[in-house]
Image (spheres, grey):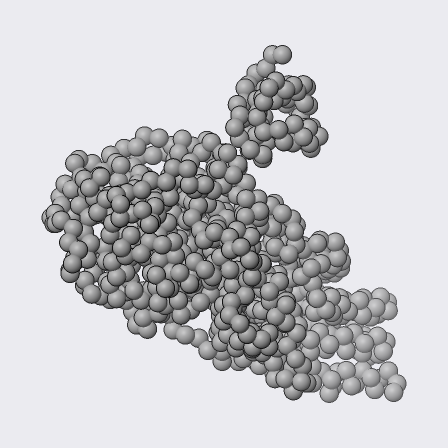
Amino acid sequence: MSAARITVGTADLDHPLDLTSPRLSVEKPAVRYDTQGDRTDSDRLAAAMAAFSQDFGRDAATWLESCIHCGNCAEACHFYLTTRDPKYTPIWKLEPFKRAYKREAGPFAWLYKAMGAKSKVSVAELEEWQALIYDACTLCGRCTMVCPMGIDIASLVGLARHGMSQAGLVPHELWAVSERAAREGSPLGATPKVLKERLAWLADENEVDMHVDLPQAEVLVTFSSIEIMKYPQSLVATARVMNHAGYTWTISSAGYEATNFGMLAGNAEWQKRMTMKMIDAAIACQAKIVVLPECGHAYSAMRWQGANMLGRPLPFKVLHVSEFLAENIASGRIAVTTVGRSVAFHDPCQVSRRGGATQAPRDVLKALGVELRETRDSGDLNFCCGGGGGVIANHRADEIRYKAFVIKMAQMDATGADEMVTSCSNCRQSFDDGQSHFRWDRKMGSLLELVADHLAGPEGIGATARQVATAP
Amino acid sequence: MDFDKDLDARGLNCPLPILRAKKALGEMTTGQVLRIVATDPGSVKDFEAFSKQTGNALLEHSAAGKEFTFFFKKK
Amino acid sequence: MDSLTLLAFARGPMLVIAIAVFVLGILWRLFHLLWRPSKPDLSEPRSTAVVRGALGAIVTRMWHHKTFRERTLAGTLNAYAYHIGLAIVFFGFVPHIAFIERLTGLSWPAVPGWLFATAVAAVFVGLVYALMVRLTSPVLRLLSDFDDYASWVITILPMITGMAVLSLALDSPYPAQPLYPAPLAIHLLSVELLLIWLPFGKLSHAFLVFISRGATGAAFARKGASL
Ligand code: SF4
Ligand code: SF4
């Protein structure tokens, strides 16, 4: 698995770069137990129920009450389409939560209570359902696009995970990465020390200015640990683009990790902890813009949930790096040369369909002069790579994830494009993993890296601040 | 055997050879012949099933070393 | 109890009860939903046109995206057939209009006979087809519960009882005095059952559809995402 691990200097021996394994994750624990903590079943159930009822706000309640059991959502979900197993019908994944809602908080909950009806959802059942809401849902939201009642099933699955997490019923590998992120600041071992070493090496190797921990900067740049550990060229590309555009920018060793596995696991506390690190870092350096890396769920976590974690509107603008590129290309601050190849773009669900930034990468590709070849279902109706929502971290889901990936391969192949790019490093590692599994002869690339490789003129043109990395 | 189009599916794992064959046949006209070379041992069974399912006749298949060759006639 | 007393009951107290349950039931469900906590979203909206987003979703979700067409077209067309059919039968048939006029004073022109007949056919065929799909599709069999089947029965009952009245009344379609009070009473009672059931079972989608689509439409508009 680690045939060609690249090690950098002596300091990095503890934290080898892993460029060859198709994906990064916590190794399968020897003993498989997917409950966390030591407590009684009734305890777990009570915790889950309390959390479910809390999360059943107005929108969630509306959606839970509205299903007409038409089954259309099955036809949108890659897991159902590639297995034809009815249990993968999106709304079915929520069945116990629907029942819990009915009894605990529904319009006739008082009736159930008056009749002394006990909750029918048991811990054993919840454990069974764990496999459906964690392993078989990437939170991609494609099902939301087909439901005639407009039910946002993906949101509901996200909420149901809160109760599961409260009850300590998270798939263990996902739990382990989330816990590590909350404890160490990064899910994959990209601690501040590793980051700084990495950046110093990359700056040196690529002769690019990197700014770390500047006391003040216009732009705070953040990363996904998948980039730090597996796609370090993305870090270089980010720096090139920032220098080229001439921003004062910095990376903060106090808040650089943009992935949020706490959110994916359903742990609200860990989610908040990860988000607040970046918010605090941005406030500390008075950043006007926080640029999020090529990562889908990082965008949801900060762009759409960040302010709710802080409890007030964010004092800075939040941009996904594809939005940042599009805006700066449009304003002329970033100039690019022509690529001259055809490209198929894979939309990261959380940025496009669920993030509203579908157009940005297309504007960037247009500026690069590529011939954009859209897949049959692209943009807001795109199929997920199969690895979102924490699914790729969970080995138990490998089999259905590979099945789902076949749709992606077929649609990408059908475009006949010279190249594939995306703007999510998690999608990218799903593609890499699928590529190695199927021995597919195509490789997923990065939009950001494509831009960085085609900046017009010498890098740094127009740069106003060429400072050397300062690490206090 | 003569063929009109050649598809190199060597190195690809199931179901990629099938996907590629489907695409290639889609671009051909009735009666034309497609040759496919694959290395995945599973492809023999897959291509037989593919032929039954799609009605494109599997004219011939052979194995030489680790390579499998298939000839399909487009329906 | 003779049939005229039964008819009087169905037209009188039972009708009042049914309408009361119908209205109060719907109000309770709406009130219950509105009363659920809803945290303000502090994220910077990409667009503030949330009302337009909500209304937009209500309209656009009336038809599926092209990419799903292959798989959802039959079901969608069928649903339209029996929904529109039900509306025509309920609001367009002369005795129904007369009934509503007696209650509310409002009236409107009836639909022509051929349209009424077509609508009746569409409802029967559509509902039977829907049930067949529900019973044969593995996905729908898994999803379906008592509510689905009960709602199906309760929806088709007024159609069946109505046909019974109609077939008996063929010689004298619109008599001043009902010729067959018992079938008519049963027809009315079946409609009242529908009214009473509607707010509680899945038939509540008749009003929830607007809130559910609206909620999602508003949330997506806020994010600048399209639905
Ligand atoms: S969100 Fe995506 S993965 Fe989850 S149920 Fe819906 S379509 Fe399937
Ligand atoms: S598409 Fe919507 S209404 Fe139909 S079964 Fe799925 S969630 Fe329910």
Could you tell me residue A77's position as x and y percent? 56, 51
Task: Say which residue appears at 55% left-offset and 51% top-offset.
Answer: A397
Quarter of the figure with the N terminus of chain C: bottom right
Relative placement, left or right, of A20 versus C158 is left
Relative placement, left or right, of A363 versus C172 is left
Task: Say which residue appears at 49% left-offset and 44% top-offset.
Answer: A377
Look at the image and tell me whether residue A465 can be seen.
yes
Could you tell me residue A415's position as x and y percent? 47, 34
Look at the image and tell me whether residue C225 can be seen.
no
Q: State the image quarter where residue A205 is shown.
A: top left
Residue at the far top: name it: B1
Relative placement, left or right, of C73 versus A24 is right
User: In terms of depth relative to the viewer, which is nearer, A157 or C84?
Assistant: A157
Residue at the far right: name it: C2
- Say above or below: A415 vs A101: above
Q: Total number of numbered labels?
A: 0
Could you tell me residue A462's position as x and y percent? 13, 43
Relative placement, left or right, of A218 versus A425 is left
User: In terms of depth relative to the viewer, which is nearer, A304 or A401?
Assistant: A401
User: In terms of depth relative to the viewer, which is nearer, A97 or B44?
Assistant: B44
Task: Say which residue appears at 63% left-offset and 67% top-offset.
Answer: A125
User: In terms of depth relative to the viewer, which is nearer, A415 or C202?
Assistant: A415
Q: State the image quarter where residue C15 is shown.
A: bottom right
Could you tell me residue A48's position as x and y percent? 54, 73
- Say above or below: C170 vs A440: below
